[in-house]
Amino acid sequence: MSATTTAKPPVTAPPPSVRLPRVLPPAALAVAVLVCLGAAWTAAVLWQAAPADGAWSWTLRAMAVAGGLGALAVLKPAGQAVRAATRAGKAATDRSRLAEARAEAADARESAWVTVGASAAVLLLTSLTLFLLANDHAVQATFFSPEAIASSAADVARAFGTNVFIAVAAEVLVLAWGLLLAVAKLAPGRAGRPLRLLATAYIDVFRAVPSIVVIYLIGFGLPLAEIPGLSALTPTWAAILALTLTYGAYVAEVYRSGIDSIHWSQTAAARSLGLSHSRTLRHVVVPQAVRRVVPPLLNDFIGLQKDTALVTVIGTIDAFNQARIYASNDFNLSSVTVVAALFVVITIPQTRLADRLLARSGTASKGD
């Protein structure tokens, strides 16, 4: 008797050209669930830790609600990743749906990584919240006391006007001084060699010395030296002079890089038309170079604005010095937080403007 064999149905396996994300979506979902549980627990602790009344009570409760809702939002991309992975697995069994399987697999991986990134952000914010709650609100009471902020904000804001004045005056002087140094460093021929050496030495020295050292030497050294005209400078103008000397070296290098970026044919064409070296720089090279270096100049000026807080070492009553007075009287650093907030308010818009100008200049260069 002949043995009869029963044919087994063929086993369909996913084509090797389709890489299915089998582990990543479930892992992302598990991470999202754990993060949500941790954030929910932190939100509950934050809600219970809020005082009975007061502005800080409403702030803490709003943070608790926002943290809980933000954590729940992490579950959405995690669910999308799992659903897309399931659809990719079903589509991969049919060779006529390979394109659909690849697309679903890519969506699953994308949603899974979005979940991981969002979970990391929620985890960091949760850790920061727990840090603020540590030691019975010690961090919040030390740095974010509403009473201390309200009592010091007006005086600190008025003193911040000194920082703004120092920054604006120094920026105007730095633009001229830095351009003069850059031109001296690029002086041509043997006749310009002494200027090149002096400008290079100046730039190297002032880029190496910290700003606070220059401010200290100018603010206290000039009065001790009793130099006519300079020893009578007020602390504010001494700070302006010190920042001009320091940042002039940085801005000179920015100008020099912009001048060097102008194609040599521009200079050759101008000289062939009979223009002198100085007139070529003035009418042809420098106008083009300045337009190119506006974004890096803004970045340097942002650093200059922050360094105006260093003038406190020579007794200038700026925002930081005013905040220190309140901090020493109240044994609380919330007034210094006000200073930080003021610098953030004036710096971030300039940073975004510098980024926009950089992006525009990059687009323009690609178009050329």
Image: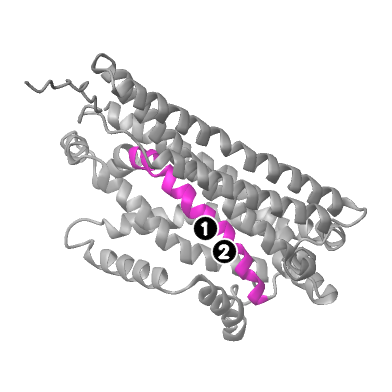
Is 313 rendered above or below residue 78?
Answer: below
> Where does label 1 land, which residue?
303
* 304 within the magenta span: yes
Q: Amino acid at mark 2?
A: Asp
User: Who's the residue at 68% across and 57% down the image?
Assistant: 129
**Left/right of residue 351 with respect to residue 195 in the rendered view:** right
Residue 206, disc:
none
Q: Which of these two is toward me, 93 or 267? A: 93
Q: Secondary structure at mark 2?
A: helix
**Left/right of residue 145 with respect to residue 9 in the rendered view:** right
Considering the image in quadrants, where does the C terminus appear?
top left
Rendered image quadrant of residue 105: top left
Q: Secondary structure at mark 1?
A: helix
- Point out residue 315 in the picture as x, y percentages from the top left corner: 70, 75
Q: Is residue 165 visible?
A: no
Residue 307, disc:
2
